[in-house]
Image (tube, grey):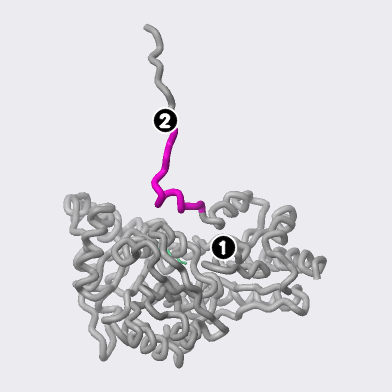
Amino acid sequence: MSKPNLNPISWKFSQRAEQLQSSAIREILKVTMRPEVISFAGGLPSPETFPVDRMRAAFDKVMAENGKAALQYGPTDGYGPLRQFIADSLSTADCTIVPEQIMMTSGSQQGLDLIAKVLVDEGAKILVETPSYLGALQAFSVYQPNFVSVEMDDNGVVPASVAEKGEGAKLFYALPNFQNPTGRTLSVERRMELVETCARMGIPLIEDNPYGDLCYSGEPLPKLLNMNPEGVIYLGSFSKILTPGIRLGYIVAPLPLIRKLEQAKQATDLHTATLTQMAVYEVIKDGFLQEQIANIRRFYSAQCDVMLEAMGKNFPEGVTWTRPLGGMFIWVTLPKHINSKELLDEAIANNVAFVPGGPFYANEAETNTFRLSFVTVPPAKINEGIEKIGKLIKARM
Ligand code: PMP
């Protein structure tokens, strides 16, 4: 038989897809997967904290006792008992959250995409922090918005900058707790000011809060959600308090928006995996998260201290960095003339890695910045890695 003449297709992507780029971090992670590299680059939680046995037991139990329901299609908004549990955990003395306000998602990353899908038209103004979470910038970019960067300082977003730049904005994307990438926290005093400013200007706030529970001391700070549940879209996630591989998060939003988000999610993936939701409910329903979160806080806090101490010893004068009160990241600012991307090339040649700051900026990048994650590298290696980076910085001073 003669071979048919099958011309290869020349792929012409949609305008939307032409906007897509691989995350700079994922590209760097490929390099840093080499076992000899001490990597402070990843945004991964520490696998030491994953409750593997409990998860396995929960999946077994759900399959044994409720296997048919667990393997069936489920409702788009998610598994009822889990949504009730989340609603209860988010409610405060003067703000009740009901399960109808909650939709489970395949990670909060899906929440970011769905929110933009239902609220953002091409050219819509989205306010973002400076810098902001790269994955959100990526998710929103697909919908071709106009990003406007809002000022931050050590106390988080500057509300006056929102007032100054926010006119006509469709959304403000906020990371109030232990921000990715800077590790900064929005001060308690500023929270109400920010919520009021946005409400006055008619700007819905997205409160993305995957790290909020991971405070090193005291209790988590008040949520913007509880200050104005009608004006805040809240994103929660199990990635940093259980495990990210299960891909489980949720959106809390006012009812009209939740209904629209549900339609968008239906079109995307019908619903998040039933088995996973049931197993997670099984794991957390009797209070396990309290113990789990306490362990992660202790562990991450100790790791953070090791890194801060090593930085104090090894980084020269003229370099500054944040001192996170929780979460997984430290943000470093070098003297203006040092480009962190170039520094990274040298660092990788020396088997140590971080993420250069540039990609975290929606607009003009500060190329003298970088992010360090301190949770996956053991203390001795943190010291070794920071010493190496310190030497490379000194050579460029
Ligand atoms: N928001 C922020 C600020 C994050 O850091 C991450 C994960 N790195 C996400 C959202 C996405 O998390 P998830 O695993 O829940 O999709």
Secondary structure beneath label 1 = helix
- The image shows residue 170, relative to residue 42, as above or below, that is below
Residue 44 is left or right of residue 391, and the answer is left
Please report the residue visible at 25 percent of the width from the left and 60 percent of the height from the top: 278
Point out the stretch of residues depicted in magenta.
10-22
Q: Tell which circle, 1 or 2, labels the residue nearer the N-terminal end.
A: 2
Q: Nearer the viewer, residue 126 or 261?
A: 126
Q: Which residue is mark 2?
A: 9
Q: Quadrant of residue 356?
A: bottom right
Residue type at numbered disc 2:
Ile
Please report the residue visible at 45 percent of the width from the left and 93 percent of the height from the top: 189
Q: Nearer the viewer, mark 1 or mark 2?
A: 2
Q: Which residue is mark 1?
A: 359
Let me know if residue 156 appears in the view.
yes
Q: Badge 2 local density, few (<14 within 10 Å), some, or many (20+)?
A: few
Q: Tell whether position 378 is magenta.
A: no
Let me know if residue 293 appears in the view.
no
| Position in image of residue 124 (x %, y %) | 38, 68
| Position in image of residue 155 (x %, y %) | 53, 86
Q: Alpha-carbon distance for marks 1 and 2?
A: 33 Å
Most common secondary structure along the magenta stretch: loop
- The image shows residue 150, relative to residue 12, as above or below, that is below
